[in-house]
Amino acid sequence: MTHRVLMGNEAIGRGIVECGCSVATSYPGTPASEILESVVTFCKETGSRMHIEWSVNEKVAYEVALAASYTGKRAAVAMKQVGLNVASDPFMRSAYLGVKGGFLLVSADDPGPHSSQTEQDSRFFAMFAKIPVLDPSSPREAKEMVRLAFELSEEYEIPVMLRPTTRVCHARQAVPLLEPERVARTARFEKDPKRWCATPRFVTELHRGLTAKLVRISADPRLVPAFFPGDDTVPRTAIVASGVAFAHTLDVLDEMELSGRVDCYQVKVPYPLPTEFIERIDSGYDRIVVIEETYPVIEMQLADRRIVGRGSKLVPNEGELTPEVIRGVLARFLGLAPAPAAGGSPEPGARPTLCAGCGHRAAYYAISQTFPRGIFPGDIGCYTLGINLGAVDTVHCMGAGISQAAGFYHAYAQDGADFPTVVATIGDSTFFHSGIPALVNAVSQNARIIVVILDNATTAMTGHQPTPQLGTTASGEPGRPVFIRDLVRASGVSFLREVDAYDVQAMTGILREADRYCRGGDGGVAVIIASSPCVLAAESGAPQTVQAVRISEECTGCRECLDMFECPAIVWDEGASRAGISQGACNRCGVCVSACPTQAIVMGQGESA
Amino acid sequence: MRQRIIISGRGGQGVLTLTRVLAEAAMAAGHEVITTETHGMAQRGGAVLSTIKVGPFHGPLIAPGEAEVGLFLHADNLPVHGHYLRPAAAAIVNAVNLAGHDFVDADRLAALAGESRAANLALLGYAAGKGVLFAGADLFEQTIRKTTPAKYLERNLAAFRAGIEAAR
């Protein structure tokens, strides 16, 4: 069997292809983005046919894949954990109605969190919806569980969740590759209004069926935890762990020279927890510690006073369960001396910043300079980094910026006509995802706000997935482009301007005009589309303007360009006590010329600092 | 063979590529290997960390004080990620000059090789040349050949070899 080093997300993508899945959908989000990309790669590599799409958002992705399963074909949908919040409506009901072809939901959690607005536990969501969830501890196991998930889903006609975490998604490991299964199925939707259209009078019966499925699943012998017996050194004591926290627990036990000393269980299906396992823990042990990320899902189902874990506060209730945290937990649980703390407290590292030449920086600079007393609701994407530039005041969830802008306006406008200028910023992909309903709402509710759509012609932060405007599918086939300007106009917006984001002067003029419109007799929502292709996206289209800059003798060393503009290509020249341009890093966008209060940044090639 | 390696740098310096080369090389040498890396917002110039565990490990993370080798693409990351190293660890830093550390100007070596973005491979070459890694330079060179697109291969190899040379 051939092996290949795969990232966890690639292993999951490979598993989806190997299982003969017919439809795969997703919306990008760290740590899940590479799953669908790998589905594309492995379909091409193995000559598999599949409909693969970057859907406009997770709710849509879920519904598209779900209907494909109704036809008897296998279908998969992948997202990050907060994406499941967006998809929660179809998700909850799909448990009651069930599925036909195997239906896999991948919801990638982010304990820590490293790149998310919460560290919520999708396993809790599975429990809430009453569907089974599998919790892989490594890329290899994640791929095996994809197969198990499809099989369970088909057997019990229920959606099955695979819940990897960041340390599985972004781990790399040698993974065995199998030939894709050729599942020859033709689409066949059997109409059954009592099920697929279930009105309330049918729902209780469907719910009864769901409960019965869960009882059968919790007795399924394939789903019992893996047992690693100890040698009775520590009698009637058990360690119960799941996910990557289980893998780290094994390493920590090894480090503590306790491997094979204490009974250890790896739970692979945290919900529904196998009945036999609950009984075994109940009768076989006096002391049990549960190590799982990030909420006490297993612990709650064991529901026993002897259990120590998050309930007893032995396991911290927040943050990632890193090896050092697990070591502390086990040392206290087993009554051993804690490990000596490793040297000193680390410093925080460099904070991320927008790239040199990023059009977002130019747009943000214009916004913050034009409205020094403005309120700036922001959104989710690279442009969240506008926080560094003082041009993002709120970051909540996908699409919230426009709605929050309207909320700020209504609250201030009640107090009088002198309301602050409210400027919401939102990226192109996020606008498609959930900005459209917010814009329609703001217009129809008479909000007087400015919305700046930062269009960089890609979904940049998650690795440059196409947006609907590009007219390219996930597989690189031509699709039909849907234009942002058309959607804005159709939302009832009468003030719409488009501008090159690099043109700070033009942008400033349009912002002032927009503010006058908002405050005028017939004012409402003003929309500005500020375009500038992402500097990291090779295929983002239009060539960028090229104008080299240098710093002249006029520089007073005021640091405005370093602190307020924060371009990585502007550096502090210690010797000269003034700013300098790092020519290697400079993108030659020329925007910084506008950012110097003493006009010391000028066009022209200079020496590299 | 058991070796725990951290790679520390800034988003955009090629930490992910270097992680992949080390993982592929470990597999080619017949070792078990598991790694983890930083994705998302931090990739935009923030401090990023990868871990590589070669040998019979299960989880990808390294606890503070455990790493035997540290490759630092940015000297400013020493106080950020240095605590992952064990006291006797081999730490190699990309720097023009850094008293008290084993350093190499990988940026300059890469620029001279005609590929300024290959400082990561120059640093790898230096570490391989110093013999601190789980495998010798030949294996890493084969892995670079296997994983690099043709149009970058020659200059990337030149940067890698310049690193080896600098270690002599």
Image (spheres, coloured by chain):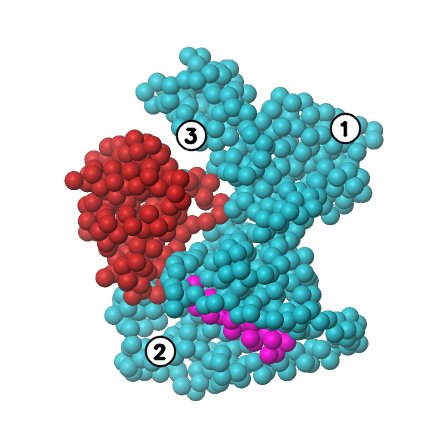
Chain colours: A cyan, B red
Circle 1 is placed at which residue position? Answer: A517
Residues at marks 2 and 1, CA–CA distance in whole angstroms:
70 Å
Of residues A265 and A375, the one nearer the viewer is: A265
Q: Is residue A335 left or right of residue A222?
A: left
Q: Residue at x 53, y 64 (%)?
A: A17
Q: With respect to residue A429, does A271 lie above or below? A: below
Question: Dot 2: within a 10 Å radius of its alpha carbon, few (fewer than 14), some, or many (20 or more) residues?
Answer: some
| Amino acid type indicated by mark 1 | Tyr
**The disc numbered 2 marks a residue on which chain?**
A
Q: Is residue A16 left or right of residue A85?
A: left
The spot of residue B80 in percent (x, y) is 34, 44
Q: Residue flagged by tag 2: what amino acid is it? A: Phe
Check the residue under mark 1 and report the chain it is in: A
| Residue B108 pos. (x, y %) | 29, 32
Q: Dot 3 corresponds to which residue?
A: A585
Residue under pointer 2: A228
Residue A609 lies, with reference to residue A255, above or below; the image says above
Frontmost of labels 1 and 3 is 3
Numbered range of the magenta stretch: A133-158
